[in-house]
Image: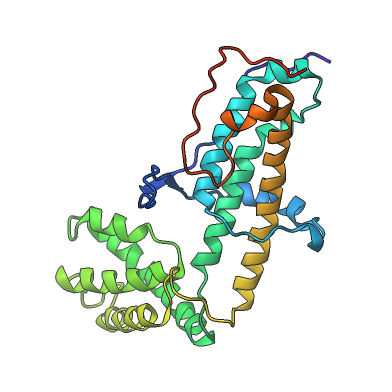
Amino acid sequence: MPKPTNTPSRSPAPVATEKKTAPADGAPAVPTVLGSADALTIHRGAAGTLRLAEVIPFRADADLAYYNAMRGRDALLAARPAVEASGFRADWARIDALGSLGLAMAYAASRVDALPRESNEVLDLLREARPLRRVLLSHARTLSLLDRCPAKEVARIEKGTGARDVANDLADLAALYLAHDLVIAGGTVQTGQVRRAEVLGAALIEKIRPASAVRPSRRTADQQSAMALRDRVWTLFVRAYEHIELAAGAVWGRHVNKHLPSLQARAVARKATTKTAAPTG
């Protein structure tokens, strides 16, 4: 078989929305990673095969873990000739797949916060709110093309995906329809739907707890399933990065932390003073 090339592969870059607030220790903030539902689909099967005793509970900053893992992966790929010369049998396919696995992990973590932590009352409200949001948003999108309302405002409302976003979107859509007189007699959207959007949005905003709120002891079945999947994908991600650390240790030995950050490290690692990487004896 031909020897694999040394050109490092790159996984699709995550879409960053906004910078997080910088931590109190002055370390730079990292971008928010949206993750990928497609990547989660790819890795869901492997996550499901883990024994329960193997699963590592997720207690981490997903964005920071992804950022540091990509730095570590790239550092190792750049040193691939030295790794191979060391005799360590690195699984390069597994290392290359870390980017995809990281996007799956970030998406799985985001789904836990997107699900409500509330009672069945909230779930019932959301079952009514989501289709109403789709109708109002679709019609507003059409009207924005006719310059009946601001296209930028419609696009802003459209970005949200979580349960709390649905609540805020209904309130914003109701305000948009009323401010620009978008309800037309005999049209797609009627006044009653706009008023209902106001009521539903206000009720959901009051009842859905923000992600920073203290979690109640009782969780919905959907959230428990989302948490279990998140923990399993996190476990795959941690194990894959541990393999990278082992491969890096074969090259840099006890100085490995000068080249690879830990998954939750906030300080930017200093570059090693040596000009070339050499296997440890």
For the rendered model, the colour scheme is rainbow
Give the position of the N terminus as an image quadrant.
top right
Q: Residue at 73% of width from left, 37% of height from top? A: 243
Q: In this view, does 144 lie to the left or right of 276?
A: left
**Foreground residue among 253 and 165:** 253
Q: Quadrant of the C terminus?
A: top right
Report whether residue 10 is seen: no
Q: Position of residue 263 (x, y in %)?
A: 58, 44
* Residue farthest bottom in this picture: 121
Image coordinates of residue 56 in percent, x first then y, are 70, 57
Height in image: 170 above or below 122? above
Q: Residue at x 39, y 67 (%)?
A: 165
Give the percent coordinates (x, y) of residue 64: 50, 46
Side of 96 where 12 appears, left or right:
left
Residue at 62% over, 47% down: 39
Q: Nearer the viewer, residue 164 or 127?
A: 164
- Location of residue 278 by image quarter: top right
Q: Is residue 158 visible?
A: yes
| Count of numbered labels shown in the rendering | 0
- Give the residue displayed 63% in from the left and 51% down from the top: 40
At which x and y percent is residue 5? 69, 15
In this rendering, is residue 132 above or below 8?
Answer: below
Q: In this view, does 102 lie above or below 145?
A: above
Q: 192 left or right of 204?
A: left
Q: In the rendered image, which quarter is residue 80 located in? A: top right
Front-lying residue, 50 or 238? 238
237 horizontally vs 86: left or right: left
State the residue in front, 99 or 36.
99
